[in-house]
Amino acid sequence: MNSLEGVVLSIERVAELSKVDVECRGSVVTAYMVGEGHDTPRLEVGSEVLVLFKESEVALAKNFCGEISLRNRFRGKIENIEIGSLLAEITLEFEDVKIVSVISRAACEAMKLEVGEYVTALVKANEITLMEAR
């Protein structure tokens, strides 16, 4: 599980849905929360939180430019690539934190990913989980 430390910047609530913006290492990460998570009393502006997301929810873009609906973007340098028979695990360094992405081997080969190059990791806002920092 990928984990970044952050501080809640803003919370917008509409019915059972909350949009939470979190500052993480100079970037703003957005999480959409439904139901119970939106009622958490400890989640307020200024709260320290952990931003969590699965490796399988991290898409990668090489030479990214243009518009895209994914709000959460982390530009990082590829530190390691482990290629299996079907999947590839890509480890990026983003602002001194590791972010791991698991993509298909075919995608990794088609993108010609290499250690040392920069890519953008993309995560949908509804795939982000927030947890109280301890």
Image: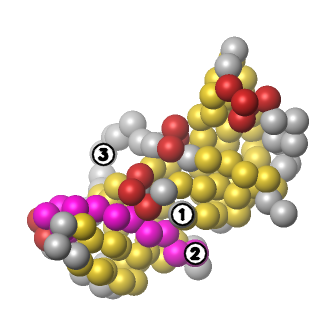
Q: Residue at x 44, y 69 (%)?
A: 100
Q: How is the image coloured?
A: secondary structure
Residue numbers of the magenta segment: 97-108
Depicted 54 relative to depicted 112: above or below:
above
Q: Which kind of residue does numbered mark 1 sit on?
A: Met
Residue 120 seen in this snapshot: no
Q: SS at mark 3?
A: loop
Please tell me the numbered disc located at residue 1. 1
Task: Estimate the x, y position of residue 123 in percent, counting from the top left.
Answer: 45, 50
Q: Nearer the viewer, mark 1 or mark 2?
A: 1
Classed neighbour count for the residue bearing mark 1: other residues with Cα under 10 Å, few (<14), some (14–19), many (≥20): few
Number of the front mark, 2 or 3: 2
Q: Residues within 10 Å of mark 2 (few under 14, many from 20)?
A: some
Q: Is residue 70 visible?
A: yes
Relative side of 58 to 33, left or right: left
Viewed as shown, does residue 95 lie left or right of 58? right
Q: Which residue is mark 2?
A: 97
Q: Is residue 78 above or below residue 31?
A: below
Q: Residues within 10 Å of mark 3 (few under 14, many from 20)?
A: few
Earlier along the polypeptide chain: callout 1 or callout 2?
Answer: 1
User: On residue 66, which mark appears?
Assistant: 3
Mark 3: which amino acid? Gly
Q: Nearer the viewer, mark 3 or mark 1?
A: 1
